Amino acid sequence: MNKRFLAPVVGIATFLLLWELLVRVLDVKPFILRAPSRIVRHLVENAGTFASAAWITAIHAVGGLLIALAVALVVGSLMAASEFVEHATGPVLTLLQVTPFVAYIASVVLWLGSDNPPVLFITGLVCMPAFAFATVDGMRGADPAARELLASVDASRWEVLWRLRLPSALPSLFTAARYNVGLALIAAYLVEGGNFANAGLGAIGRRAAALNEGDTLWAAIFAMALLGTVLLMAISLLQRVVLHWHVSQRSSRA
Amino acid sequence: MSRIVVRDLTKVYGDLEVLSPLSLDIAEGSFVSIIGPSGCGKTTLMRIVAGLEPATSGMVELSGGTPAEARRQKRVAVVPQQPGLLPWRTVEANARLLLDVHTAANPSDAADPTELLREVGLGDFLHAHPHELSGGMQQRVALVRALSLHAPLIVMDEPFAALDEITRAEMRLLLARLVEGRGATVLFITHSISEAVALSDRVLVSSSRPGRIVADITVDLPRPRPADVEDDPGFVALCAQVRHALHGGRS
């Protein structure tokens, strides 16, 4: 158990140490690359500001993820139920996934105004396809013997969805959630920076970049990394509790 | 109890004829096994009787009604080849699964799954999850799940096929104990001659595809049948008779 926690700490500490050494030994100029110690010092000195900004970004990212999940469960259920819906919806979801959302941030901000709505909208939009595909895969993968069994007692579509298909989709939904956390944070950061609001780590980062405040920009990046780690750990914890019956959780404990 | 009447049943998938005109009459409360080579349409027949698949032509009646009606009224209990347990449900919740859905059709005399689980020796595993059970234990849960419905017809599709020989023998005795005296009609599909003879009142031998019944052998061994029924000369003779029919008189 200790090794599970120790290994990542050692890995990250080594990475930061090498970075620090590189900057010091090669005397890299701060405008090219700052030493991590300098970034951490700035972060600690302004901990209050960064903490409240991180809280806002966390709400944007988690809010966007939850909206994406809710929409994807409906879309994915419809896709799993009908091949026509799947074939009609699949390409649209793929387009959403491969289109650089950065390109239309300004349009969405003009449409939805500044503050929370455009951030939640774009974060939800970019995270939705992965959740929808995971829902379809998980539901389609439901045990055929169990499906037949429920059919043998004339279970309704709703009962099959609720008792069998949704729980069957949980493992793939968690996999999608781990992938989507990074995407949600990046989307939240970029839209916060582009929507003329003075809140969130994205806004701090964007302002710092415009004003050439390297320490603040790097501190915002570190804060994002920290936030991402915390969110991923929270998802892992939730996964262990919710999926205690699943083979992925059993093998990790063995 | 349920009488099964099958008249001139056929099933064709595209160009593939799975069942050639097949007729059966199975008395209420009897235990009938169908044995035949792989791909002879046994499972298809079972699925049609259980109302899970329509026939191409012909007719199936379960106590005067159609299989679809029986299915809607929860009067058919299915035991599939794979246990089909839901991994997120406990043993107790899995045993209750068929009673938890379409509850309007639950029989008033449904058996208590927990009691049945205790009866089959799983009393200490009520809150365990399927992955904590052996294959035989999982299949016992599947049996309890079907029996809890208290359905007049039980159809079983090679339920012990995936089990080892020792567990299989135990399951056979357990099944006999659970079913005897309950009055349900049982349609049992198997590949095992000894299993068919030990459990059944009648053994129907099917030809290879397209499936049709080539022998109808009555098993008149007294019940309850002891664990060592396989040593009985009558049992040995019946097994030989089934084997002979199965190999088309070539054995």
Image (cartoon, rainbow, N blue to C red):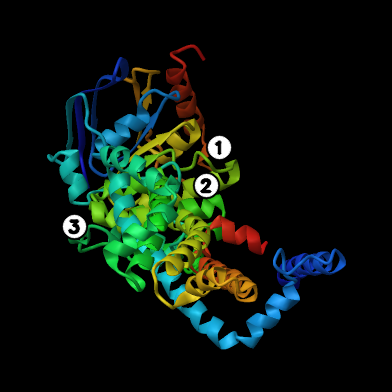
Query: Mark 2 or mark 3, which has the lower sequence index?
Result: 3
Quarter of the image that includes the N terminus of chain A: bottom right
The numbered disc on residue A107 is none
According to the image, label 3 marks what residue?
B105
User: Toward the viewer: B92 or A129?
Assistant: A129
- In the image, residue B179 lies at what x, y percent? 36, 50
Asked whether residue A10 appears in the rendered view, the answer is yes
User: Toward the viewer: B129 or A170?
Assistant: A170
User: Toward the viewer: B180 or B116?
Assistant: B116
Q: Is residue B78 left or right of residue A2?
A: left
Which chain contains the residue that carries disc 2?
A: B
Q: Are marks 1 and 3 in contact (CB under 8 Å)?
A: no
The numbered disc on residue B227 is 2
Three-letter code for the amino acid on which mark 1 is drawn: Asp
- In the image, residue A5 lies at what x, y percent? 71, 71
Q: Secondary structure at mark 2?
A: loop
The numbered disc on residue B231 is 1
Which chain contains the residue that carries disc 1?
A: B
Q: Is residue A99 above or below residue A14?
A: above
Three-letter code for the amino acid on which mark 3 is drawn: Ala
Three-letter code for the amino acid on which mark 2 is drawn: Ala
